[in-house]
Amino acid sequence: MNNSQAATGTVQALMFERNEWVPNNPRLPVLIYPNAIAVQGDDPAALFEQTFNANGWPPHWRDGVYSYHHYHTEGHEVLGIVSGKARLMLGGPDGQVLEVNAGDVLLLPAGTGHCNLGSSADFLVVGAYPPGQQADICREAPTKAQLTSIDTLPFPDQDPVQGSQVAVHQYWAGQR
């Protein structure tokens, strides 16, 4: 469950321990960027995609968040909330419920459990990963090899929202 929570300016960091079969990430916190990107124009998803891509996180999809608990071992994932709102559970079963709205961004390190508990009909998310990484869908306890992947998966030098500054450097850089 949630061990610690810190906020720096507009970024919040949440650290999760292993939760039942969900490994979470033992070293890297989830980063939450409330109201990170202004939602405007005819194609607001493109604003998220441009921001992520410019910062070294190529966008991969536009969709929602699965309604079942899962995590990834082959990619750190950034989720940009383009429209609507949702209640997401982070950290696995009985984890922490987070309400997200259009403009919010979540950075989930590999291993972090997440699940959509309910969302508005217009809920839309842009998902992106560092180059060469992807979202394998894991729904059971990780193997030893998957735990090693979570622990050793590289991450880019740039923050997906803030570029070469701030959050990733502050919260993740010391964990390389």
Image (spheres, rainbow, N blue to C red):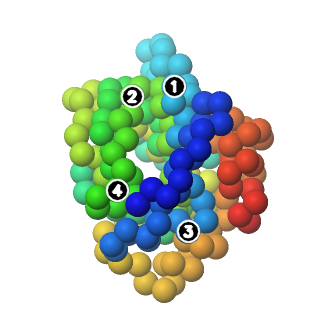
Residue under pointer 3: 26
The residue lying at 68 percent from left, 55 percent from top is: 172
Q: Are marks 1 and 3 in contact (CB under 8 Å)?
A: no
Residue at disc 1, secondary structure: loop
Q: Of tags 4 and 2, which is closer to the observer? A: 4
Q: Which residue type carries mark 4? A: Gly
Residue at disc 2, secondary structure: strand
Q: Does residue 120 appear to the left or right of 132 in the view shown? A: left
Q: Residue furthest front?
A: 4
Q: Does residue 143 appear to the left or right of 149 in the view shown? A: left
Residue under pointer 2: 101
Q: Which residue type carries mark 1? A: Asn
Percent coordinates x, y for residue 11 in the rendering: 60, 37
Tell me which corner region of the image, top left, top right, bottom left or bottom right, holds residue 167: top right
Q: Of tags 1 and 3, which is closer to the observer? A: 3
Residue at disc 3, secondary structure: loop
Q: Which mark is residue 95?
A: 4
Residue under pointer 1: 35
Question: CA separation, marks 4 and 2?
Answer: 19 Å
Question: CA separation, marks 1 and 2?
Answer: 8 Å
The residue lying at 25 percent from left, 35 percent from top is: 119
Question: CA separation, marks 4 and 3?
Answer: 15 Å
Q: Does residue 60 appear to the left or right of 53 in the view shown? A: left
Quadrant assignment for the N terminus? bottom left
Quadrant assignment for the C terminus? bottom right
Q: Are marks 1 and 2 in contact (CB under 8 Å)?
A: yes
